[in-house]
């Protein structure tokens, strides 16, 4: 594992080659660490990338052209060593390529690049997935950053609200052991807001489909985190059950299986089909 730092007048961030994962997002403006610091007793990650699937597969397996393959929840990229292919004072690019190891569980040649870039008061994380094979590849990709919440002394999780940039009527889609069971619940108040509480996560993550927004604010009376994303049509909000220490804001291009999902990866909801040599781009960013 190799750690790299980027810094400007507003942020100092730290990224690891292990999973190309953000390890620190320190706000100079607030003199605060914004990113969850991976307490192993609570949740041992910071901001993993989800690739080549998002969420869980039914029976942790899928079929492609008649052959069965197995993948763990959220795929394998978060547990693999990336290489640094470019680095400057305000931008760094990591890359993971298909290998004999990945082809055994995911039979598609690929290149995954993750770019972290500081642009004044904004931090960007951009994904580029390239099909390096000679036939169509099928994949999903997503973000899973955890942010300290509540951030300021004396605050509680219930002091915080998530507010979308546009009106939304999307219900949450409920999970059963990591798979969608077809049930839904309303969580968005007045078409804009989700007031936070630990009770919200008794039923696992809040998963939203078909949002109009590509930005939101995680805010209290004293603190505001601006979060934005692009080309990621699903959105998850997660905190560990019973926890009041962090919130994960998760834009996804892809989604977990339902309990009655097809085993064929080509028929998986939200799956992206990418032609040879083509590139998919998406990502997220923050400002405070």
Image (cartoon, rainbow, N blue to C red):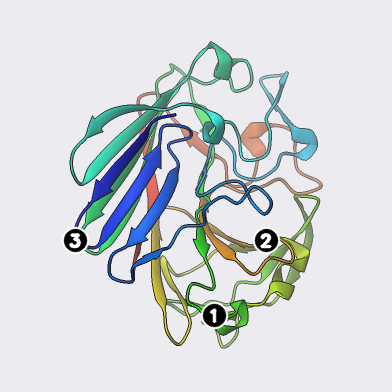
> Where in the figure is residue 136, as x and y percent of width and height?
49, 25
Residue lying at 33% horizontally and 68% vertically, measured from the top left: 31
Q: Residue furthest top?
A: 100
Frontmost of labels 2 and 1 is 1
Q: Secondary structure at mark 3?
A: loop
- Give the residue at x 66% y 38%: 267
Instruction: Say which of marks 1 and 3 sits in front.
Output: 3
Circle 2: element type: loop
Residue 237 located left or right of residue 264: left
- The residue tagged 2 is 205
83 lies above or below 73: above
Q: Quadrant of the C terminus?
A: bottom left
Residue located 52% across and 27% down the image: 80
* Res 12 seen here: yes
| Mark 1 vs mark 3, CA separation in Å | 27 Å
Q: Which residue is mark 1?
A: 160
Q: Earlier in the sequence, mark 1 or mark 3?
A: 3
Mark 2 crowdedness (10 Å alpha carbons): few <14, some 14-19, many ≥20: many
């Amino acid at each position: 594992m190799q750690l790299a730092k980027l810094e400007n007048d507003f942020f100092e961030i730290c990224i690891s080659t292990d999973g190309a994962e953000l390890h620190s997002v320190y706000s100079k403006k607030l003199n605060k660490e914004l990113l969850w610091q991976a307490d192993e007793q609570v949740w041992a990650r910071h901001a993993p990338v989800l690739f080549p699937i998002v969420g869980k597969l039914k029976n942790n397996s899928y079929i492609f052209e008649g052959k069965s393959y197995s993948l763990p929840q959220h795929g394998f990229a978060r547990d693999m060593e990336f290489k640094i292919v470019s680095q400057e004072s305000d931008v760094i690019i990591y890359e993971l390529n298909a290998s004999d190891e990945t082809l055994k569980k995911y039979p598609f040649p690929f290149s995954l690049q993750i770019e972290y870039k500081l642009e004044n008061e904004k931090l960007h994380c951009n994904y580029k997935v390239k099909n390096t094979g000679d036939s169509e590849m099928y994949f999903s990709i997503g973000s899973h950053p955890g942010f300290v919440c509540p951030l300021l002394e004396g605050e509680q999780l219930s002091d915080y609200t998530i507010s979308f940039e546009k009106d939304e009527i999307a219900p949450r889609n409920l999970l059963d052991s990591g798979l969608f069971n077809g049930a839904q619940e309303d969580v968005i108040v007045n078409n804009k807001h989700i007031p936070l509480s630990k009770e919200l996560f008794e039923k696992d993550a809040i998963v939203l489909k078909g949002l109009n927004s590509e930005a939101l604010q995680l805010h209290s009376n004293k603190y505001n985190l601006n979060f934005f994303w692009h080309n990621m049509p699903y959105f998850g909000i997660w905190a560990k059950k019973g926890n009041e220490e962090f919130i994960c804001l998760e834009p996804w291009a892809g989604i977990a299986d339902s309990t009655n999902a097809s085993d064929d990866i080509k028929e998986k909801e939200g799956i992206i089909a990418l032609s040879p040599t083509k590139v998919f781009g998406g990502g997220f960013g923050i400002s405070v």
